[in-house]
Image: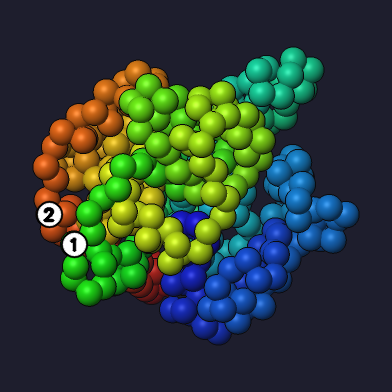
Amino acid sequence: MRGGEKVLELLCQAYPDADLLTLFHVPGSVSPAIERLRPRTSWLQHLPGARRFYRYCLPLFPAVIEHFDLDAYDLVISTSHCAAKAVVKTGRARHLCYCFTPMRYAWDQFDVYFGEERVGTLANRLLRPVMRALSRWDAATAGRVDRYVAISQHVASRIERYYNRDAVVIYPPVDTSFYCPAGDGTPVVPEDFLLVVSALVPYKRIDIAIEASRLSGVPLRIVGDGPERESLTKLAAAAGGSAVQLLGALSDAEIRDLYRRAAAVLLPGEEDFGIVPVEAQACGRPVVALARGGALETVIDNVTGVLVSEPTPAAFAAGIARARAIAFDSGVIRQHALQFDRAVFERSIHHTIESLAHA
């Protein structure tokens, strides 16, 4: 599961009698704690091919999310990176939104997702008015939330900019008891490879990591899947064949093993928070990250990793070289990651929800 699902998992554990509503659900794709609530889906779930092509349903999301009947509820908790924050509640109900980000593609990252080089000239022109309409709807429905909780200071500033609303910050949870150095206490000697753990989508900028790996001469392993896999496979082949490996989706245990053994974990894209760098640091490994967005809140330059000023292969190759020259203290790195532990999240979100419910 990705970071959003891990947040939802803890909320489901905290409120086991709640009703869980979602636009889509693929059975077996989430943990038993989520499945136990028997997610109720929208009518989009029944469209042919919806599980595979749900991204193409984006223009329908506003109408569908507003169709959910919430009349029976006094407290609504939404986890939202797109449309969930716009549910329509009753006047007596309170609504807390745990906001991963205002819609990136509708606000300031349209070209990253729908630039001409990615979707073609015709699709680019057709999608521009659609995304403008989505951004207007997104701003117009911001008032339906009683309290915003942001995943980072970076996202809180986006909420203020686009929604004109304040937000408290509660960092997403990381299971630092699972993501940890080797269980027997034996130090793991880092191997000579770099690691990326990511959905293969445009804004993650995996292309930068591949080219930086070639420039630095250090092998790269990429964990994850997504719509960019085919193009990234071609790019990896052009960069040097077996030096770049796309491993696909792996289990959490397999990812933890790679974290422990990697020379460094790369974060080449601008993240709203970035849970992967924290998981890597919990395992005692340094991170080479773009010095923008959430990484500025999770990575300490020269202490728990290296911050790179520009999103270019050359800058990341230089960052990799700098990281390889630093004698990082894995104990210090892990100690830094503990502030993002699940228990910290649970206490903070419970207090915030209870204070809203009884306001």
Task: Please state if 194 lies on the left or on the right of 141 as rendered.
Answer: left
Per the model, the C-alpha gap separating discs 1 and 2 is 14 Å
Location of the C terminus by quadrant is bottom left
Tell which circle, 1 or 2, labels the residue nearer the N-terminal end.
1
Q: Amino acid at mark 1?
A: Pro
Q: Secondary structure at mark 2?
A: helix
Vertical relation: 211 (above or below) 288? above
Residue 88 place in picture, x, y as percent: 64, 58
Front-most of residues 359 and 305: 305
Q: Amino acid at mark 2?
A: Val
- Residue picked out by circle 1: 187
Looking at the image, which residue sits at the far right? 48
Query: Could you say which disc has been placed on residue 264 in the image?
Result: none
Q: Are marks 1 and 2 in contact (CB under 8 Å)?
A: no
Front-most of residues 192 and 205: 192
The total number of labels drawn is 2
- Residue picked out by circle 2: 332
- Mark 1 or mark 2, whichever is nearer to me: 1
Residue at 61% from the left image edge and 34% from the top image edge: 233
